[in-house]
Every structure is written in structure tokens, then in C-alpha cells.
Image (tube, coloured by chain):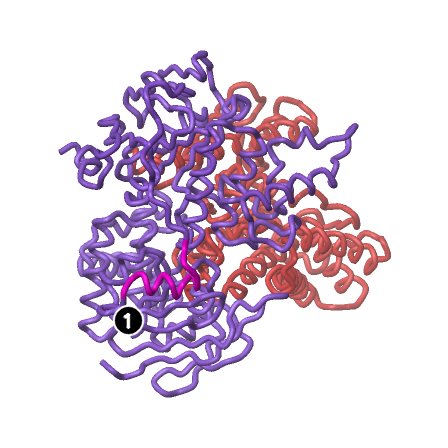
Amino acid sequence: MENILLEMKDIEKRFPGVYALKKCYFGLREGEIHALVGENGAGKSTLMNILTGCIPFDSGEIMLNGEQKLFTEPKQAQLAGISMVHQELNLMENLTVAQNIFIGRESKGLFLNEDSINKRARELFKRLNFHIDPKEKVERLSVSHQQIVEIAKAISYDAKIIVFDEPSATLTDNEIDQLFKIMKELRETGVSMIYISHRMDEIKRISDRVTVMRDGEYIGTRDSRTVEIDEVIQMMVGRVIYEEHKKISLIDKDTPVVLKAENFTSKDVKNVSFELFKGEILGFAGLIGAGRTELARLIFGADPKESGELYLDGTKVDITSPHKAVENGIGYLSEDRKRYGVVLGMNIANNIVLTKLKNYIKNIFINEKKIMESADEYIKLIDIRTPSAKQLVKSLSGGNQQKVIIAKWLLNNSDILIFDEPTRGIDVGAKSEIYKIMNDLAEQGKSIIMISSELPELIRMSDRVLVMCEGEHTATLMADDINQNTIMKYATKQ
Amino acid sequence: MLNNLKKIGMQKVLAFGALIIIYIFFAIVGRNFTSSSTTLNILAASYFVGFLAIGVTFIIITGGIDLSLGALMMCSALLGGTLYRDQGFPLWAALLVMILFAVFVGLLNGLMVTKLKLPPFIATLGTMMVCLGLGSIITNTSSKYFPTLLESDGWFGRVFFKTTGGFPLGAVYLVAFYILMFVVLNKTKVGRYIFAIGSNEEAVRLSGIKVDLWKTLAYVISGLGVGIGSILYAATYTVVIPNTGNGIELQAIAAVVIGGTSLSGGVGSLTGTMIGVFIMSILKNGLISMSLPAPYQTFFTGLVVIGAVLMDVYRNKKANQLKKI
């Protein structure tokens, strides 16, 4: 147990202008599950990508079993017994499950043997107790099943060291339970694992030790059984973080209704009606597939609805496209930021003014100066951490990207904001800043719909919680009813 | 039944259906369309494009494109003709050089895309123009003649042009090439990695596979197809004129697309490509049998391409909807 299997010493990685890693250390014992935590941008993924030969590093050394190793290609790390489940899903969507798992290890000769890899894949899933058809094309699988295929692939290398980069972000609770069970079984057989996560509760649940990184540096390693989670968080953020508990809701009968939805129905949503008050944060709770996002997209006009009437400030409006929703002051912050929320290749300023570009045009030319002025104003207002408004959005952390999106909708004078999983994949420090921004907005009279799968944040933030189950609206909870047990009761229709 | 259809690929089925319908249409309205001479013409009209289309299918599956095919085919034929007529090369040696030259240019295309990281569109646009110019430079812009059936070295025509019965031998070579490449694409690692790269290149790299090698190989295979195509072209026409051959690559790409291979990579089939080639060839001969001039062929081929891509888009949309559920 005390044997040091792997040590990474003084690892340095520079990207143009910045240190991604500074004299970074990481040590892994044989047969342990080692949690690796840190804010977004702390360098966890970078460090692990260096370990597995996916990206080169500038200086430092990697010792495996006391021998110095240098992996310049993923293949070399695989041969040395290290495999990794990457954070971004890295699957070949047009190939089948089995073809994905055994890519590069099909057969000795030139010719393929489909039956053999299908059989090996079936055995693998049986061993792992997941039910996925090896012959199914990956593009037909749900995101969580795709994640499971990745995990199965990493395990199938029979590696001595497996790196899991935030696998739980896309898995359902049952699947996470199953994953942890598998990890514990692997530990029994002597496999060492590195587990990157943002979920603090998982440190205690699964890991033996935890290493904290911050700003590309090694902060420290603790025994997971004895460490206090608060201490880990302190180490991660290096400061006391902003924690605000929901004060007593100010919403009452006299508060004006800004949005009223009646009988919204579509393929995934069954006859849902609700009201949104001015200055309220209305939480949408439910399990995955309950229809929360689908309902929000109906309100926003992003998907066609079968029926449903929408009233804004008491006036009936017909919102048939996102364009109309935006015109009517509704803003939607997608759960998939990178895909739908920001234009990664454009700078902050241009992202912020995107929906209001027509206000920045003089004659027929774009007024860059005015754009920069507005951008600087919002960067200051909601504290986007960036050297300048000209920074490309793709170089920002998840939390700051989220702030750019918020700025965009604020500039648009949106009075109703729909936040879909606003803190997914965002580190603890940035999370509390997003919470603060949301609370400030509500105080200023904006109305917010917040969809979240993390019950604690939903409970902390919401004035009221609308619970859904299988497309149906099962309850609207207020005040003391907003607690984990009650929400789960309605979310599962028990 | 529906599952079977899914397996074969909806678009391939549709393309095959279109092939049959177009054939029946011309059989009814065209003059002598079902005669054996027209059938032989259909076969004869298909094979240059066929060789190019089979090769470029590999490239398109990786997510790339090759615009140099037509120019390269002519350049290779001009080079062979020059060596044979002006440099005293024996014919067999000239033919070998033609194939090697085309493979070499394919390799260059591949290396430009993988090692120099040029976008395939730009890299092969450049090669296309280089080949066009080179063909004129080495021949001094004069046409090159390959031996006809009646000259010495007449074996060239007997082996590569047609049988005494008039059967176009190019079609036989095309089918052989198709079968060989079908095996390579569907039954070997080469094909698996080419599909995988088109599907998600980064994932392939992270799986420890030499992406550059396999991707380059797709361009080399395409070069091989062009090389064989250039020999058959020379055997059929015996006169090779500089500054021609432009646009054949677009016909080849059109055939690939009609056959259901996605220009975004990861999806495709050689059977589909062959169907695409024959659809274009039937269109051409069918319109001739209706006494309509050549521009009509281009016109209708264009419509077929648009229709095929529309179906592809529709199919992807359906697939995405299924995924959401």
C-alpha cells in the first residue's frame, strides 16, 4: 500500500505567455484511488495529459516504478500500463461500440475479425455489469452510455494505472454507483486510479487520498478519510469562498407575474403550466429525462410545441422562434456552453454584443470602439477575469465563459433569464460567483428560471421549485417544502 | 426489415433505387437504350470516373477532399506518352512510371495534409494546378499519342482497351479494383482506421494510433486509382491533350456523394460510389439516346447531386432526432 508507483516531479508546461504547470508534483501509491481536485484551469487535466503522453511538457521528470519515463505518444503510455478516460468524450461516433473499444488492437494481422471484438466487448460489459450492445453505433448511444464505453475502453487495456477525468459529470447516479463499485474491485486487483472530480462528496466516497492543485501548482495531499472537505475547498481556492444561503423568499401574492405558461405540451413535455414572478428564482428539478430542458426550450421557442399559451406581463405572445423570444426579453443560457452559448473563436467583446450588434453600427460599419466600451463595462460589472476584452473566449475558464454569456443577455436587456445547468463543469470558486450574480440579478428585478441537477444548489438558490417527472409537472414547492426528500419524492412520483 | 435497411445504409438503397428507375425511364423513352451497344457504352463511360471515385472515397471518408484527380490523371498520361514517344522508354516501363508518378503525387498530397497541416482543399487545389502546368511543360504543350490496336505495341489496346468483341476491358479492371478496395476498406485495419479518423481524429490519436500514416495512405490509394485510370484513359483515347481533364475530379466527387459518402467524413461506402458512377454514366448515355446534347448531362447530374445531398442531410436530421430520444 505504501509503495510509490508513480511520481511526477517538477513538471512544467508553458503555453504562450502563461505557465499551465509550475514545478508540479504528483505521487501515486500502488493500489490506491487518488482523487485529484482543483478549480477549473488549475492544471489537473494538463498534468494527466502529460502523464499519458497526449501533450508534451517542457521540463520535469516522470518516474514509474523508480524508472524515468518519457512518453511522447499515447501509445507509449498505454504500453507502460497507463490508460485514461478523457474529459471530453473521445469516441468515433460512426463506429460501433466494440470497434471503438478495441481500436488499434483489432487483430495481429491486416484483416479484421468483427466477431472476435464483439465477443471481447460483450465479455467486458458482462464483467463490468453494464448493458450495452457491442454492435450498436456509438452515435446512437446516450451521453452517459458513451461515457461508459470510454470507461470500458480504458479498463480494457488492463492498465496498472487508470486516469478518470471527471467521468461523473455525465453519468446518472446509478451509473456512478456502478462505476465506484468497479473502481473498488479494480483496486482489489492492485490497479491504481487517479480520479478527477468537481464533486466534493465523491472524495470521501471513493478515494483513499486526495491531491489539490491550484493555478498550475501542487498544493498538497491529504488522507481522504481524515481530511475535512472544508479544508480541501480552502486549499483549492486559497481563500474563503462566498457562501450565501437563500434568505427568506420575498415573493408573495402581490408580486407581479411576468411569465405565465399554460398547458405546454410537446413530445417530451406533458401539459405543463406555471407562473414566474418578478424578481424570482424558480428552480426546475427532476431526474435526467424529466423534460426540464425540453420545457425551457419550448418557452424559448427553440423546439416546436404541440400546444401551449404564453403570457408575458399578462399579454399573450406567440413565441415560435428563439429570435422572437430574445425580442421579448427572454434569454437562454444553454447547458452546453461550448456548443450553443458562446462563439469560442471570437473575442469576449464580440460575444457580448452578438445579439445587439445592430446598436453598434454606424452607417454600415461596425463601431469597434463602442463595442469595446460596452464590453469593458460588463467585464467590470460581473467581474470577468481577463486581461482584456479582446481575449478569445476559448481561452477562458468555464466560469468566465458562463459570465460572458450572462453579460450578453444583460446587454440584451433580457428580463427573464433561463439558466440551464449554469454551474456544470465549473469549479467551486466560480460557482459561488455565478450564484451571487444570479441573486443580484433577481434583486434587481430580473426573473430567473434555473434548471439544475445538483439539488443542494437548487435548494439554496430557489424561491420556489417546480418538480417534473417524465414530462409531467408533479409539484411546485415553496419555503420549507424545498428540501431534498420532498423534491425527490415528486421527482420519482413516489 | 427496417433494421436491415439501416445496416445497408438508407442512402445506398435509395441510390440503387434511383439507378433502376433512371434505367427503366431511359429504356422506355430512349432510342435503342437497352441495346448491347448502349450497354457497352454505359460501361465504357464509367471507368475513368470510377477509378478516381473509388480512390477519392477513401479520402472523403477521412474527412478530406482531393481536387487534383483529373489534372493528375492527365499529367500522368502525358508523362507516360512523353517517355514512350520522345524518350524511347519501352511501353511497359512508361506505364509503370505513370502509376508510380500518380502514387507519388498522392503521397505528396497526403504528406502536405498530415505533416504540413494544410487543409486538403488547398493542398490538392495547388497540386491540381501544378499538374495542369506540368503536363504542358513536359510535353511542350503538344499532344501525346499512345499506340492504337493496329500499330506496334498493339497489345496495349488489346490488354487495356477492348476485346475483339468490343467489350470495354476498363470495366473489368474497375470491378477488380472495386473488389480489392472493398476488402481493404471493410475487412482490414486500413479501412477501420480511415473510418475512425473521419469520425473523430483526436480520439484515434489518443487511442495510440498513427493517424498521419493511415491518413496519408488514403491519399496514396487515391493516387493508385488515378494511375490505373490514366493507363485506361490512354488506351481508350490514344491521344492525350494537355490542359484537358479538368472537371473529371468533380464528376468523381459527385459520384461519391450520390453514393451516400458524407463529405464531413466517417461515413461512406464503395458500393454506393459504384452506384453513383453508374447513375452518372446511365444519365449520360440515356440523354444521348434521347438525342439531347452533352450540356444536358451536366445539368441533370447537377440535379442528382443536389438531390443526393438533400437526402443525406435529411437522413442525418432523422438520426439526430433518434439520438435525442
Left or right of B324? Residue A1 is left
Answer above or below: position of B219 versus B13: below
Chain part drawn in magenta: A228-241
Instruction: Give the image quarter of residue B131.
Output: bottom right
Q: Which of B20 and B152 is in front in this view?
A: B20
In the image, is residue A238 part of the stretch drawn in magenta?
yes
The amino acid on which the numbered mark 1 sits, given as a three-letter code, is Arg
Q: In this view, does B188 lie above or below B132?
A: below
Q: Nearer the viewer, residue A100 or B92?
A: A100
Residue to which mark 1 is pinned = A209
> Which residue shows up at 34% across the image and 20% down it?
A264
Colour of chain A as rendered = purple
Point out residue B197 in the picture as x, y percentages from the top left corner.
48, 56
Q: Colour of chain B?
A: red
Looking at the rendered image, the quarter that the N terminus of chain B falls into is: top left
Q: Mark 1 — on which chain does it sit?
A: A
Residue B232 appears in view: no
- Compared across the picture, whether A242 is left or right of A265 comes to right
